[in-house]
Image: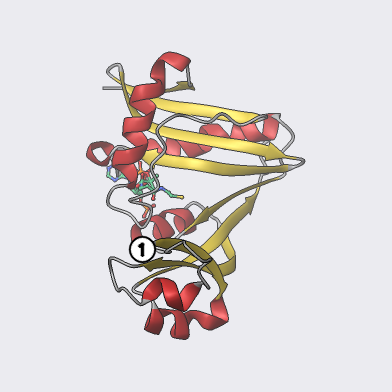
Amino acid sequence: MPIEIRDYRPADEQAWLRCRVLSFLGTAYFDDVTPAKQSPAIGAELVAVQGGAVVGILDFSMDGNLATIDTIGVHPDHQHQGVGTKLFEFARIRAAALGATTIDAYTRDDEATLRWYRARGFAESNHYLHVYANYYVNADEPGKAVEPRLGLFPIKIFLHADLVQEAEMRQEFQRVHVCRRFAQPIDVQ
Ligand SMILES: CC(C)(COP(=O)(O)OP(=O)(O)OC[C@H]1O[C@@H](n2cnc3c(N)ncnc32)[C@H](O)[C@@H]1OP(=O)(O)O)[C@@H](O)C(=O)NCCC(=O)NCCS
């Protein structure tokens, strides 16, 4: 069945949210769940539709000449069929039309996702750490991350840290991700 790339419509919201949750489920972003769709002030919201069903999503937002991919996801049953690449090619053309000279995205350390960005010609930079301190993983973790305020008991904390601290962070916290920027120039005429 052919895949159509088109602009998101408000009626797509539930399908969009489900596609996002399911595409992220097997990745380092498994718990990055949004219950309502946000729209970029300037940018594009694209969906890939097959047989009437939303099978892929891509949002990017513009900041000057920079287009940043805020969300890209393909439903797990439809991955590795070219949907993500089609969405990305469409986004590049749209971003160029909006005056973008660079397109970028930030992502964690899923090998398949990293391979996908590299194979699409993105270059990596700006590596840093995403650290989770979680009482339910180890009751000592929150205390290693923050000084609690009187009467408040930290349970789950999300922190950024410098990459040079990676070994130390991995020793102290169970969930640590290396986040990085992927970027490429836009040369679409
Ligand atoms: C990363 C992601 C968006 C890629 O989307 P996708 O639709 O699976 O990607 P594509 O099918 O376009 O490309 C994947 C591979 O399949 C191959 N492929 C493309 N069409 C194909 C086909 N018809 N048959 C078999 N393989 C195919 C491509 O060559 C590509 O391989 P390569 O990366 O080695 O070049 C998707 O896997 C995803 O949603 N991942 C989870 C969410 C996520 O990590 N999002 C990013 C967070 S920032």
Amino acid carrying mark 1 in the image: Glu
- When asked about the image quadrant of residue 3, the answer is top left
- Residue positioned most to the front: 151
Q: Which residue is mark 1?
A: 111
Instruction: Residue at 69% x, 29% y: name it.
Output: 97
Residue 82 seen anywhere in this rendered image of the structure: no
Instruction: Residue at 53% x, 73% y: name it.
Output: 147
In the rendered view, tell whether residue 170 sits above or below residue 180. below
The local secondary structure at tag 1 comes to: helix
Instruction: Residue at 56% x, 82% y: name it.
Output: 164
Q: Nearer the viewer, residue 54 or 151?
A: 151
In the rendered view, tell whether residue 69 sits above or below residue 45. below
In the rendered view, tell whether residue 102 sits above or below residue 57. below
Q: Nearer the viewer, residue 149 or 94?
A: 149
Residue 18 image position (x, y, % from top left): 31, 32
Q: On the rendered image, what quadrant is the C terminus found in?
A: top right
Instruction: Residue at 45% x, 41% y: name it.
Output: 72
